[in-house]
Amino acid sequence: AAPHTLASGGDDCRLRVWDLRAFSAPVADFKHHRAPVTSVEWCPHESAMLLTTGADNALAVWDLALERDPEEELQLGIAANAAAPEDLPAQLLFVHAGQTDMKEAHWHPQIPGLIASTAADGIHVFKPANILEA
């Protein structure tokens, strides 16, 4: 993350990204979790990427450099590209579920893309296939 950027998650289920130089309103505001956000962590290998965990037992990986491109989606067509719901943020890169009472997650400091998540039923360590190495 840029030195003037802050990410926050709250009981309103939202991930917000703030520019500390102009703190009056978030520069990005996403709602994907269905319960309070329990942790947020920037990726140490990719400055535009972060992850969140929520009380909904989901972990989400976000890439703030991504944007929806309606022209490209139209060119690809429905057969080549599943139609994404309009309310699905283009920046949502990956979702991991299947743990009970998920608390937090962390990026591995030396292995790009490797994530460990903790929950009441154990620890999951995984590397999403759609996260490229830095």
Image (tube, rainbow, N blue to C red):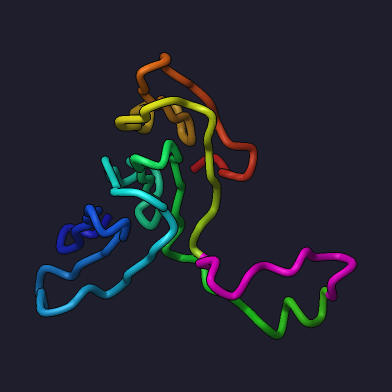
Where is residue 11? Give x, y as percent.
23, 53
In the image, farthest residue toward the bottom:
71
In the image, farthest residue toward the top:
122
In this rendering, would 131 be left or right of 3?
right
Q: Residue sitting at 53 percent across and 72 percent down?
A: 87
On screen, 81 above or below 21?
above
On screen, 29 above or below 61?
below
Q: Nearer the viewer, residue 127 or 86?
A: 86
96 in magenta: no
- Quarter of the image where the N terminus is located: bottom left
Q: Main secondary structure of the magenta part?
A: loop
Q: Quadrant of residue 71?
A: bottom right
Looking at the image, how many numbered discs can be counted on the residues?
0
Q: Residue sitting at 41 percent across and 52 percent down?
A: 34
Q: Residue sitting at 40 percent across and 49 percent down?
A: 46
Q: Nearer the viewer, residue 125 or 47?
A: 125
Where is residue 24? Give x, y as percent.
10, 79
Where is residue 55? Give x, y as percent.
34, 40
Residues shaded magenta:
77-90
Where is residue 61? Give x, y as percent.
46, 47
On screen, 40 above or below 21?
above
